[in-house]
Amino acid sequence: MTTSAETLQQKIVDSLGADLRASEVFRGQAWIEVASDAVTGVCRRLRDSADLAFTRLAALTAVDHWPAEPRFEMVYQLYSFPHQAFLGIRAFVAGETAALDSLEPVYPNAVWHEREVLDMFGIRFHGLSDPRRILMPTDWVGHPLRKDYPLGYEEVQFSFNAREIDRRKPYAAE
Amino acid sequence: MGIETKLGNLGILTTSLEKAVNWSRTGAMWPMLFGLACCAIEMMGSQAADYDMSRFGMELMRPSPRQSDLMIVAGRVSRKMAPVLRRLYDQMPDPKWVLAMGDCCSCGGVFNNYAIVQGVDEIVPVDVFVAGCPPRPEALIHGILTLHDKIKGQKITEYA
C-alpha cells in the first residue's frame, strides 16, 4: 500500500520542523532540502522514526553546478518499506572546501557511494572509514565529473591526419 | 623427394621442420579467458555448442595465463585495468599471440574519453584485430583462422 507523496511530505514537514529549508512534490516523489551539516541528523531521525521508517538508502550522488555558487548539490534518496515510497533529500555544499559528515554511521552501505562521490567530485566526508578512490586508478590526479575537467578524448583519425596521429601514438613494442 | 618418386604415393610425409612446428602450434591453441565487457558474451557464444571453436583446436579456455597460448582481449580496457592486462600478458609463456576482439580494444570504440585506453595495442603487441561491436561468432572464428594463417606463414628464423 503506497502512501501518497503529499501525505508523506506533510508528515516529514511536521516531524522535522526547523531543520527543513524547503520541500516539494515533483512527479509523485517528495523532496526536501536541508543544510549540509544537518544531513546526518535528519537521516538518523527519518530512519529511527517508527512512523516514517526510511530504513534504506537507495542513492547517494552529487551534482556540479559550476560556475554557480553553491557549487555542489548532494542528492540522497531514501526508501521506506511500510510506505513503499521514496524520499529525495538535497543539500548544497560550497565549492572551496567541499566537505560534510559521512552517512556511514546511519546507513552502512553509504561507504561505496561516498567513495564514488569523493573520486568523481572531490567532496570529502568526515568519518568515512575508507577514503580511497573507487573508479579511477589510485594515483589519478583530478576529479573527472567536475564541470571544469577536460573530456580527455583522443583526436579522431581521418584519412588526412591518420599518419600524423599514428606517429605520435604510444604503441607497445613487445 | 627422391623417396616419393621411387616408391610412389605411400603416404610418406616429407615436410620441413618449420611446417610441422607451425601446424602443431595452430592445432591446439588454448585461449585465455580475458572477457572484459560485452564482447565476452560473444566469445562465450562462439566457444559454446552452436559456433563451436573446439573444432579449430580451442578445446577450452584457461583462466590461468601460464597455461594458455592466445589472449583474446574481449571488451573495453580501462586505465585502471591496463597494468593488470600487461602483467597477465607478461605471465604468458612463449609462444603467445594476442587477438583484439571488437572495436573497444582495437581503437577505443565508442568510448573516446579519459577512462578507456584507446586501443589495446598501446599496451600489448596485437597480432589480429577483429572489428565489430560485438563481432559475430563467425567474425571471431574468421579472426582466429586469420591468426592460424599468419602462424603457418611464419619462418623458422623468427623464433628459433
Image (cartoon, helix red, strand yellow):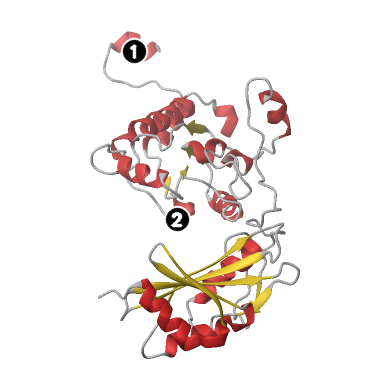
- Closer-to-camera residue (A68/A81): A68
Pointers 2 and 1 within a single chain: yes
Residue B121: x, y in percent? 60, 38
Q: Specify the subunit that label 2 lies on.
A: B
Which residue sits at x=53%, y=48%? B93
- Closer-to-camera residue (A47/A14): A14
Q: Is residue B99 above or below residue A87?
A: above
Mark 1 sits on what residue? B4
**Left or right relative to B58: residue A26:** right
Q: Specify the subunit that label 1 lies on.
A: B
Q: Amino acid at mark 1?
A: Glu
Q: Nearer the viewer, mark 2 or mark 1?
A: 2
Residue A127: x, y in percent? 62, 83
Q: Earlier in the sequence, mark 2 or mark 1?
A: 1
Q: Is residue B160 visible?
A: no
Mark 2 sits on what residue? B64
Q: Is residue A82 above or below residue A97?
A: below
Is label 1 in a helix, a strand or a loop? helix
Is label 2 in a helix, a strand or a loop? loop
Q: Amino acid at mark 2?
A: Ser
